[in-house]
Each structure stands twice: as C-alpha cells, then as structure tokens.
Image (tube, rainbow, N blue to C red):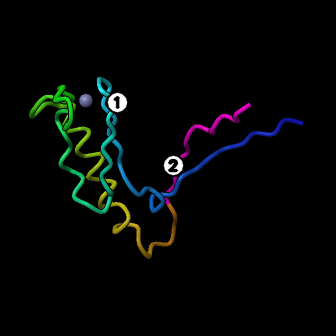
Amino acid sequence: MTVEQKCFIRAEDILSIEYECGSCGVKTTVPVRQNTRAVPKECPTCGVGWLGYDTAEIKTVSRFVGGLHELSDVLEGRGFKLSLEIKYPAEKK
Ligand SMILES: [Zn+2]
C-alpha cells in the first residue's frame, strides 16, 4: 500500500509575510493584516538591494502580498474555503 500525504494551508491561516535578507540573514516579518503592498526594496539592516524601483518584479511581489492582505476579507462568509497545497514537511531523523 502506498500512502501519500499532502499538506494544505488555508488563506486565513497565513498570518504574516517574512522577508529574509540573502546577504545578512536578517528577517523582517510583516503581519498580513497590515498594508503589505509596501514591499521593502532593500534590506532594512544592511541596505543590499532586493528589488528595483518600479520594475515588473516588484509589481508582481506587491500584487501577491497585497492579495494576501485582501484575501481574508474577500473570503469571509463565503460558501467555500481556499487552501494552498504546500510542500509536505520532511520528517526529521
Ligand atoms: Zn541584509
């Protein structure tokens, strides 16, 4: 018998967005309930650039995080639940 495990996360379970600097490792967490459309363009600690100003990349990231901000209100009271499948966490040995 083969057992397949899947892991889903509901939209309302997403509490915050974390930005981790690839240079210095500092993590910045922004609650989804805040206006998350303001994506940091550089690391607040070491200043390394993350995304250019007014680029397609920052617009894509802004739409994504802004959508998360609006999602819980849009879905509240609806007749369905929206979930995202995520990679199943590997077991620690
Ligand atoms: Zn940094």
Determine which of the numbered discs, if any, sits on residue 84 in the image: 2
Q: Which residue is at 21% across, 58% downward?
A: 35
Residue 84 covered by magenta stretch: yes
**Secondary structure under the numbered disc 2 in the rendered image:** strand
What segment carries the magenta color? 82-93
Q: Quadrant of residue 26?
A: top left
Q: Position of residue 15 (x, y in %)?
A: 41, 58
- In-front residue for pair 36/46: 46
- In-front residue for pair 26/18: 26
Residue lying furthest left:
54
Front label number (1 vs 2): 1
Which amino acid type corresponds to the residue marked 2 in the rendered image?
Answer: Leu
**Secondary structure under the numbered disc 1 in the rendered image:** loop
Determine which of the numbered discs, if any, sits on residue 25 in the image: 1
Which amino acid type corresponds to the residue marked 1 in the rendered image?
Answer: Gly
In the image, residue 46 above or below residue 86: above
- Which image quarter has ligand 1? top left
